[in-house]
Image: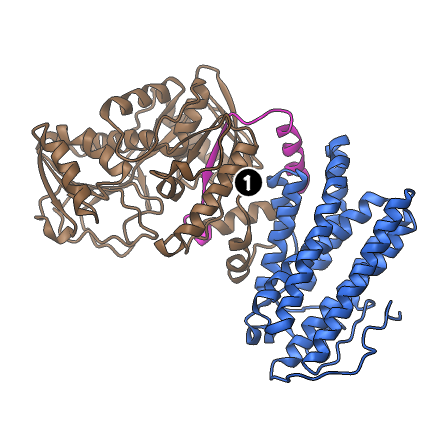
Amino acid sequence: MGSSVASVAGRGRTREADFALIGHQESWRAAADVLAVLRGPERTRLPDDELKDILPWIPPRAVCHVDVESIVGAQARGLYIDSFIPPDRLEAAYVHENIARVRGAAACAIKAGAKIVSLGGFSSILIEGNFDQLPERHHTVFTTGNTLTVAFIVQGIKKMCALEGRNLSESTLLLVGATGDVGSGCARCLAPMVKRVQLSARNVERLRRLATQLQAHGVQVEIATDLQGFSAEADIVICAASLASPSLLLGRIAPDVIVCDAGYPKNLSPSAEMPGAKVFFGGLGQITGGLRFAPDFRGILNRHPFPNVVHGCLLEGMGLALEGRFEPFSQGRGAITPERVEEMETIAARHGIYLAPLFNADGPVQHGTSLPGGMIERLTAYASASRSCGGSSWRL
Amino acid sequence: MEPLVSVNDSPMECTSLSASAPIWQDILAQAMTGELLAAMNYISLSEICDDPAEVADALEHAEGERGHAAAFAAEGRKIGVDVTNNVDAKHWKRLRDAFLGCLTERDFIGCLIVQEIMLESFAVASYSRVGKVAPASLGKTFARIAAEEEEHVDHAMSILRAERALDAQRFDDKVHRLHLDVMTTLAQMLAKECKDGHCEVCHATCVKPSLFEVSLSAAELRGASLQQYLKTLDKLGIPGEVTLAWVAQLPV
């Protein structure tokens, strides 16, 4: 492992990165898997107590190189940089420490010469609205990646409704975390398509402002800071709250509700009892041209049941890099509009970045995908092969 | 091996004797041993320097490290404990041997990497942590010496950066080779528990399980030391993904 990392680094020195992805692990198990790859197969995994002692001391830094390829032949080279925010320190109490970590990760991206940087998970939540807190950027631009996340959430909702035979225009949509950048973007995109919208968030003033925006377009809107304040009519729920751990209990919801959990970490508590609910993880896309990690973090940094599935926020940076559009496409809070989402979807699709097959904690929720004909069979075949061969790179 | 300098030759001035004195005694013993070993390393280094200015620098550093050792001994006397040292203790001897290996090859850069990048990272980080929690003059002494050691690192950094600029791959390979030897030993020293028996520096049983009594922990000292090491390697320009793997592969 050591020599392969060194050789990758040697290669990396010859060319600056096109893009960088800043992220963090959402669970100790995920963090343990990352360290296990770095330690190599010949060494034992770190015991949990050692992992929890060591990880908080690791400064933000690159973990691996990421190469992506477009279906039209464009290629981009990048880095995955982990801020090493400990999974149990995502709460507000650690906000200053965590912002410092994201700043440190941003400095790594700038030093690597990345032209565009995507801010994954809490990285964007910590920085959205605080872009002035990033280090001096030289030629590096930052995007939260939230526009493509919104695009994939909206696509996922439409797809799930189609699969379940639901009429979106007759539905009541509940948005949890409605005033965040992703939540408000989803509201703007989906509100015109549904019968009624229920908006939930902690800040009532922001809720009122968003409701006013939507009502100006003739949308029926209810707001509440407490989910119990809503009637139990929501039949589509999007969970996009910035929660430090999966702790959301939806409480009163309609039977057979469609729930999109778009949080990172996930929003829904594992103990949430929602009999009949159709839950899927939202905001995820799949890059079909090719994705390679060096060292091989396949299935470790993207822990999903389908190959080459990545969070939309990170895919936005890759898509823009493949497009050669090095611009801060998503910045700040509340600027995501249906037009911007459509523009980003177009860029992504041009390079073979599509909505990921829908899945949840139990695995795939359906067999159809939005991919071109025959693609799902190839993906499924690859998924089986990759589990057994352990190769370090692949292309569809 | 005899101590390089006698640092316990003035009368003991016991100003306080708390229940934690035996813990500070062992912390001081480790620190003093490290300083004396550093002094020996700098004297050895002076023997392979061609430039008279470098010889003078090395001897000046050696004198500074002896002063640090004497300062730690003096702090021990203030709290009524006798601070011993043992540069032949198993871990410290291995560290000295690694340095001597570079010296035998007249590898000036290798010597600097071992002493300034690896051993000083450990010293700067651990002294800084101790400096934050140790009472009165003891804390101030650790903090002052941490700052002085950091200056040593800065001094060496410019030489090492210039060397790396000549051939980065060769330089990084050398650092890695020395890392496998020196940092593996340091990692064993810094492990939460001494799994290989007594360290031969603590005056009785291992001090690590008692560190919480003085608001320290072995895990914290290890974490801070490895963090300092990674940041120092960053300053040298070695890619972060490479050094992360190096550190991840150390024993725990």
In the picture, the quarter occupied by the C terminus of chain B is: bottom right
Q: Residue at x 63, y 63 (%)?
A: B143
Along the horizontal axis of the image, is B36 left or right of B186?
right
Chain ID at mark 1: A
Query: Pointer 1: what residue?
Result: A63
Along the horizontal axis of the image, is A296 left or right of B111?
left
Q: Quadrant of residue A44?
A: bottom right
What is the x, y in percent for residue A233? 9, 44
B77 or A327: which is nearer to us? B77
Disc 1 element: strand
Residue A18 lies in the magenta-colored region: yes
B158 or A235: which is nearer to us? B158
A83 or B157: which is nearer to us? B157
- Identify the magenta region: A1-29
Q: Residues within 10 Å of mark 1 (few under 14, many from 20)?
A: many
Residue type at the position of mark 1: Val
What is the x, y in percent for residue A30? 46, 49
Which chain did the renderer colour blue? B
A95 or A318: which is nearer to us? A95
Measured along the vertical axis of the image, is residue B219 above or below residue A179?
below
Which chain did the renderer colour brown? A
Q: Quadrant of residue A321?
A: top left
What is the x, y in percent for residue B4? 87, 67
Measured along the vertical axis of the image, is residue A115 above or below residue A73?
below
Image label count? 1
Q: Residue at x 70, y 47 (%)?
A: B154
Q: Residue at x 86, y 55 (%)?
A: B59
Residue A299 lies in the magenta-colored region: no
- Residue at the farthest top position: A72
